[in-house]
Image (spheres, rainbow, N blue to C red):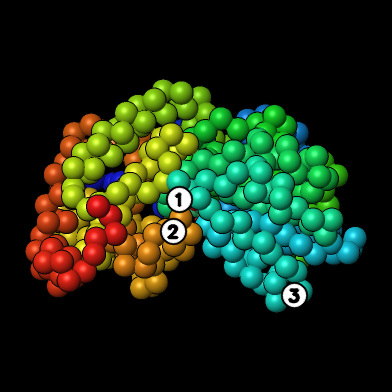
Amino acid sequence: MRIYADNAATTKMSQTAIQAMLPYMETIYGNPSSLHSVGQEAKEALNDARERVAKVLGATAREIYFTSGGSEADNQAIRSAAVLGKRKGKTHIISTAFEHHAVLHTLKKLEKEGFTVTYLDVHANGLVTPEQVAEAITPETCLVTIMFANNEIGTIQPIREIGAVCRKAGVLFHTDAVQAVGHLPINVVEDNIDMLSLSAHKFHGPKGVGVLYAKRGIILTNLIEGGAQERGKRAGTENIPGIMGMTAALEEAVAEMPETAARLTKLRDRLIEGLSEIPHGEVNGDLEHRLPGNVSFCFEGIEGESLLLLLDDKGICASSGSACTSGSLDPSHVLLAIGRPHEVAHGSLRLSLGKDNTAEEVEQIIVSVKEVVEYLRNMSPVWRDLMNGKRQFVIK
Ligand SMILES: *Cc1c(COP(=O)(O)O)cnc(C)c1O
C-alpha cells in the first residue's frame, strides 16, 4: 500500500475534474477560434469557465487569463508590472527571500535588466509583516510580490493587510496563491489583490493549466506572441479540456473547503504531535498561520534525501522541500530564509496531506518516520559527534 503525502508537489485529479474534461476531448474538441459549430461550442464552454473561475475568486471574467500553470502566471504578472513600472521610471520591486523559483528567477532576471529588488527577511516563524512591506516601499517601487502560502513550510502571509499597505501607497500587489487557492478562502477584492497566480494541479485539477488574475486596468505584457487568444495577451489555442477540468476542480475544492480543511487540520496536528516526539527535531513555520495539510520538520544529524528514499521503500511519498530543488544538494532556500543553518536545513522533511489521506495513514507515517530517522542517525558520523559532544546540537 502506498501513502501519498506530497500534495504540495501535485495532487491526484478528482473524478469530478476528469469527468469534466472528457466531453472536450471526445465530442466538443473544436478550436474556440473556429466559426463552425464545434468551435463555437468550445468557445461557449471557455466563456462559461472564465465566468465560473471569476466568480470563485470574486473577480470579473475579463480579469481572468488562462495560462499553462502557476509558473507562467507568476512570470507574466511580474514582467507586466515591471514593464508598467519602467514606463514611469519606477524600477524597484519588493518580494521575500522564500518565494517559489518561478518568482525568484524572474526577479533575478529583472535585476540583470536594471531593476532593484528588496527581498524582505522572513521571520523565524515563516511570516513577513505588513509593516515590513510599508517600510520597504519607496517612490520608485512598482510592484510588491509576496506569496499567499509557502509551498515548503505552509505558512500563510497576512495578504489582506499587505494588500492594504500597497493600495495606500499606490503600488501594484501580486500574490503567488498557487498553494492557497482551493485550500483557503480568497476574494481578490476583499483581500486587496491586484494580480494573483493559481495552478490547477495543486487542487486536484489537471497539470499544465492555471490562471493569472489581473485587476481591470492592468495592461499585461505578452510572454507568448501569436493569435489573439486571452484578449490578445496570451497566444496559443486554448487548452479547453484542461480549463474545464480546472474549473470543475476549483468549484469542487471551494465547496468542500470547510469540511476538508477541518479534517486536514486535525490530521496535520496529529502528525506534528507524533513527529515532535523525535528528539532533536523541530517543526518549521508558524503553527497557527499554516495550511491545513502542511507538516514540515527539520531533524538534526540526518540527510533529507536518505530519509526520503527510505520512506519511499516503506511506501511513503514525501518531499524534503520543494520538488523543484530536489535533486540538487543545496539546502532549501526557504529553510535558510527562516534562519535554519545549512546542516539543519539538510535534514528536512515535508509531508503535505490531501483530502484522500486517512487517520490510519498518519499513524503509519509517524511510525515509519521515527524508525527511519533512528536508523539513519545510528549510521551517521555527524550524529555520533553530536551525541559525544564533539559538536553542539542546534535543535535542543
Ligand atoms: C507549484 C507551484 C508553482 C508552479 O506552478 P506550476 O503550475 O507547476 O507551474 C508556483 N508557485 C507555488 C507556490 C507552487 O507551489
Q: In the image, what residue occupies the spot 23% across and 31% down? A: 359
Q: Residues within 10 Å of mark 3 (few under 14, many from 20)?
A: few
- Quadrant in the picture for residue 354: top left
x, y percent for residue 200? 53, 45
- Which residue is at the front of the view, 16 or 259? 259
Q: Residue furthest bottom?
A: 112
User: Mark 1: which secondary structure?
Assistant: loop
Name the residue beneath numbered marker 3. 113
Is 87 on the left-hand or right-hand side of 26?
right
The answer to the question of whether label 1 and label 2 lie on touching residues, with beta carbons closer than 8 A, is yes
Q: In the image, what residue occupies the spot 45% across and 46% down? A: 125
Name the residue beneath numbered marker 2. 339
Residue 251 makes an appearance in the image: no
x, y percent for residue 248? 54, 34
- Which residue is at the front of the view, 347 or 338? 338
Q: Which amino acid type is shown beneath numbered disc 3? A: Glu
Is ligand 1 closer than 8 angstroms to the Cβ of mark 2? no
Q: Residues within 10 Å of mark 2 (few under 14, many from 20)?
A: some
x, y percent for residue 357? 29, 36
Real-space Cα separation, disc 1 to disc 2, in angstroms = 6 Å
| Quarter placement of the N terminus | top left
x, y percent for residue 48? 68, 33
Mark sitting earlier along the chain (3/1): 3
The answer to the question of whether label 3 and label 2 lie on touching residues, with beta carbons closer than 8 A, is no
Is 146 on the left-hand or right-hand side of 231?
left
Q: Which amino acid type is shown beneath numbered disc 2? A: Gly
Name the residue beneath numbered marker 1. 124
Mark sitting earlier along the chain (3/2): 3
Q: Residue furthest right?
A: 88
Q: In the image, what residue occupies the spot 35% across and 32% down? A: 264
- Quadrant in the picture for residue 80: bottom right
